[in-house]
Structure formats: C-alpha cells, structure tokens
Amino acid sequence: MALSINRILVGLDFSDADIPLLKYTSFLCSLVNPVRVYFVHIHRSLDIPEEIRKKIPQLRQPLDEHLEEQMKETVENIFGDNISFKTEFIVHEGSPLKEILRWAHIKNIDLLLAGRKKTSQGSGILPQELSRKISCPVLLVPVMARPVMKKIFLPLDFSSYSDIAFQYALKLAEASHAEICCYHVTSLPSGYYTTGKSEEEFFSILKEHALSKYQKLLRKFRADQKTISILIEPGKKSIAYMVNTRAHAEKADLILIGARGHTNASALLLGSLTEKVIRDDYDIPVLVVKQKNKKLSFWEMIKEI
C-alpha cells in the first residue's frame, strides 16, 4: 500500500523551530517521496523604511528576495543531496494564518508541516489554529522532535474518522517499518451500577466489545497483526491527558489522530480530544488526519476564522 503524499507545504517563521522542522521534513520526505515541496514564509509586512535600508546593507534588496535566499540556503544545508522532488520557495505578505490557508488551497496540498513551540515561547497559537482550520492533514513538529518513526500511537474510538486515521497509520507504518500502538479509552455509562455489576465487571464487558471492533477493523483493512497492538483502558481521567501520558509511556515517535466533523463546515474544526492533545503535547509530533473529500473553498475556510 503506497503512501501518496505528493504535495507538501512547510511553514517557516525564521525562528529556532525552523531547523528541527526542516530536519524532520527531510526525514519524512525520505519515507513518502513527495513530488513537490513548498517552503512558505508569511511576513506581516515586507515594507522596510528607507532609513533602515541605508543602515543595514543586507536589506537594500527587496525583503522578500532576501528572505527567499535565506530559506533556500537553509534548506540546501539541511537536505544536502537528498532532494529528489521539485521545490518552490514562497515569501508573501499578510496574515500568517490566512495566507497559509490560501497557499495550501491554491497548491492543493496533501500535508502541511508546521513547527510547534510552547505558547510561552511566542508561537504556540498559529499551529493550533492551522490544525483547526485547514482542510488537509497537518503535522505539528515540536522543537525537540527526533527524526525517527519506530512507533506510531493511534487513539481509536472506532468512528469513521478512526477508520481514516487507521488507514493513514497503516500507510505510514509501511513506509517507515514502524509498529502501530492503537489506544482505546472506555467510559462507563451513567447508571451502570443499576445493572448489579461491579465497575471491573462492566469494564470487562466494554473491553471485549472494543476488542471485537478492533478485530473487525483489522479484517476490514487486511492489516498485518504482527506489527499492530491495542491498549484498552477505563477512562478515569481526561481522555486527552490519558492519550498524552500513555503515548509518552509507550515511547511513541508520533501521535496520529483523526479530526472529527459531521458537515463540510465542521470538518474544518477539530474534536475536543484532538484539540486538547495538540494543545498539551509539546514533545511528540502530532499528525492530525482529515477527510480529504471534505475540502472547502478558500473563502469558506476564511469564514470559519
């Protein structure tokens, strides 16, 4: 099963997050073999006052050209001779959120990569907003991320969005030879005690039900069980907290999670679990998978902002 990620957009902001992001991008490209990669930087304003131009010789050329040259040099230093795809460097003026959404739409992007820093470091909001609004899969890469993919952590609730995420995980695992650790959290229904069964007994029933769904999922996609496992736990804390805690305990290299939504408009918005996972985890890369046929027009996306 070939992984088809042909068009990748990488958002750069000329911060310390760019280097680990580009290293991870180079690693990912070696796995998925894209056709074209766009390196994009959105600057609030490209207009530089003349008095500043005179004082800084490097800024005597147009700022967009200066930034584009810097991007090219950095990419060449990190990728070296490992560029087997076409590249394009884009420097544009405007709102970073709106412009990245616009370029992702114009270029029909299959996957967006963005650096991930803690909010206290100054740019924690934009990646989260991009994840919420963009209509293609988005991979958030923390500053401390290692370019390795041996274990993919996949939260499942057995919805249609879980199916999409599961297929994506299978394709990515095939390309990287990674194992997949599926994770399901059960929640006891209110009033379960009226059945006369203990909490442990009821969890056992729910676990068997989840295992049955898991086996159906494996059969549905003809998955190789040798490299796939599942953990099922009772939901005694916030599910997002449990996902992040278990992902770290399992030494996962990637959290892959499906975005939820029932209409074209809500397909752009994330479920509360996904929101909390990408908000709280700054150590493990998080890949948010969305249903591609739920793409909206650029103007529909802008209305959602």
Image (cartoon, grey):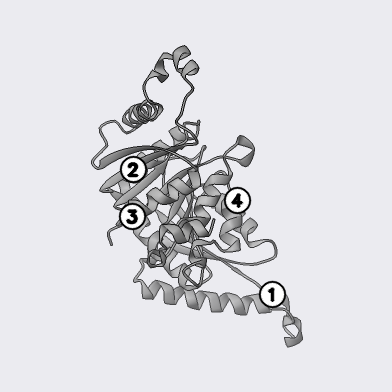
Horizontal side of residue 123 vs 175, given as left or right: right
Is residue 277 at all visible to an observer of this figure? Answer: yes
Q: Earlier in the sequence, mark 4 or mark 1?
A: 1
Q: Determine the image quadrant of residue 165.
A: bottom left
The answer to whether residue 92 is above or below residue 152 is: above
Amino acid carrying mark 3 in the image: Asn
Tell me which amino acid carries mark 4.
Arg
Q: Of the residues tagged 4 and 1, which is closer to the observer?
A: 4
Alpha carbons under labels 4 and 1: distance apart: 32 Å
Q: Nearer the viewer, residue 114 or 64?
A: 64
Q: Residue at x 29, y 57 (%)?
A: 4
- Residue 200 tag number: 1
Across and down, in percent, residue 116 comes to 52, 42
Relative to 145, say whether 73 is above or below: above
Residue sitting at x 36%, y 30%: 68
Specify the amino acid type for callout 2.
Tyr
* Discs 1/2, front: 2
Circle 3 Cα neighbour tier, 10 Å, few/some/many (<14 / 14–19 / ≥20): some
Residue 118 vs 57, above or below: the answer is below
Secondary structure beneath dot 4 equals: helix
Q: Which residue is mark 2?
A: 38
Q: Quadrant of residue 60?
A: top left
Residue 3: give x, y in percent of width and height: 30, 57
Q: Position of residue 94 (x, y in %)?
A: 47, 40
The residue wearing badge 3 is: 108
Spot occupied by residue 131 in the image (x, y as percentages of width and height): 50, 53
For the question of whether residue 141 can be seen, the reply is no
Give the secondary structure at mark 3.
Answer: loop
**Which of the labelled discs sits on residue 215, or is there none?**
none
Name the residue that disc number 4 marks: 279
Q: CA distance from mark 4 to mark 3?
A: 26 Å
Q: Which residue type carries mark 1?
A: Glu
